[in-house]
Image: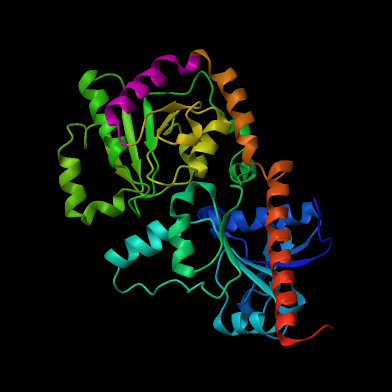
Amino acid sequence: MKITKGAKIGITAHESGSKMWSNGLYQNAYHLVNILKSAGYDARPVTENKEREGKKLLEHEIEYLHPDNISDYEVIFECVHSLTEASMAAAKEKGVITAGIQYGNEYMIDVMADSIYKFDKPPRVNKQNRDAIFMSPHFEPSKEALSIMYNLHVGIAPYIWSPDFLFIHEKEEQLLFNKDTDLRKISVMESNLYFVKTAHIPMLILEHAHRQDPDIWDTAYIIGAKRLNDSKGFVRFAKLLSTKGKKMFFEDRYRFGFLVKQNYAGLIISHQHHCALNYLQLEAMYLGIPFVHNSDYFKDCGYYYPEFQAKKGAEQLKLAIETHKDHFEETREKERKRVYDFHPENSKNIEGYAQIVEWILEKRAKENKKSKLFTGSNK
């Protein structure tokens, strides 16, 4: 396909540091820079915060972006943060393409949940004056809604994940599943921040499995649930479960690698709602850790149960505990091949992002040509 070699592209990002590991957006920005460089573009991380000028997104120096230099770029992708009004106005005036890259579930979280439950939270930037928006494939159910909201083209961008960030704090061999791993020690690692990823169904899976066989699992750590101690609704829910406080414990948020290395996550149970691609599942697949999940993208991987069907989830939990060690090596090999579908070095993903860049460059060229026709200019 055609590549506009050397086209300068900015990807909004902040400096590296703790947030690189705690927020997937920073990893997304880093991978996006590398993918676009691999495709042949002059891609760079940018920030509008003067204090972050010269900081690094790992090996990439972050450039300071402001209204006076925005015309140096042909395209700005809003990844980690949106452009300020001043920069957006300058981009429009100088013909710089601006496009949103939605790696978060904007419609479900920012539009639906925040507007109903967080009255005081400021709204996100209105993206009506962008050139386009591109979202991860698992958010496609909200594609039409965002398209109508912003009156824009909304496209799909490849989902990207790499195992590299798994091994910043721990070595790979410390995290790999092996025959000594205790499958009866289970972790649930949902964020419990919004309804798209919560611990409720995994807790019900654990409870039902325990009722069928009290010895099927030993200990369950509900990570990131300690913050819900003040939620009367969650406390009521938890009190309905016989395992709460005896075998099921509510913990703060911990790093994935730490939990695995300490053998607190011999097996993982997850649940999502319209958030079917996330790092947790890919991390488990790469390491060979059995994961009980409801992601339609990975029906052939891990131990799948449909939607909210916790009883089927309990069946899958039992299956994982009783059989996973018999075939974990071949399972890991198969699932690593599946994980590569999302790798930033996969040529399909590089081409997918190149197609996005070329589409918006062509769109702008057509608009400029049309504008000249209307103004009578033939220059």
Using residue 146 as the reference point, say whether residue 174 is left or right of it: right
The image quarter in which residue 5 lies: bottom right
Determine whether 319 is above or below 118 in the image: above
Q: Is residue 61 visible?
A: no
* Residue occupying the point 44% across, 67% down: 149
The image position of residue 129, as x and y in percent, is: 55, 76
Could you tell whether 367 is left or right of 156 in the image?
Answer: right
Q: Residue furthest top?
A: 326
- Residue drawn at point x = 55 percent, y = 82 percent: 85
Depth check: 271 or 225 in front?
271
Across and down, in percent, residue 132 comes to 59, 65
Quarter of the figure that contains the C terminus: bottom right
Report if residue 334 lies within the magenta region.
no
**As displayed, is residue 199 above or below residue 12?**
above
Q: Is residue 322 magenta?
A: yes
Bounds of the magenta span? Answer: 308-325
Looking at this view, is 304 or 232 the one in front? 304
Residue 27 visible, this orientation: yes
- Of residue 172 and residue 343, the one placed in the foreground of this image is 343
Q: Position of residue 375 (x, y in %)?
A: 72, 87
Q: Is residue 183 left or right of residue 215?
A: right
Residue 308 vs 39, above or below: the answer is above
Q: Quadrant of residue 4?
A: bottom right
Counting from the top left corner in percent of width and height, residue 318 is at 35, 20
- Which SS does the magenta portion mostly show? helix
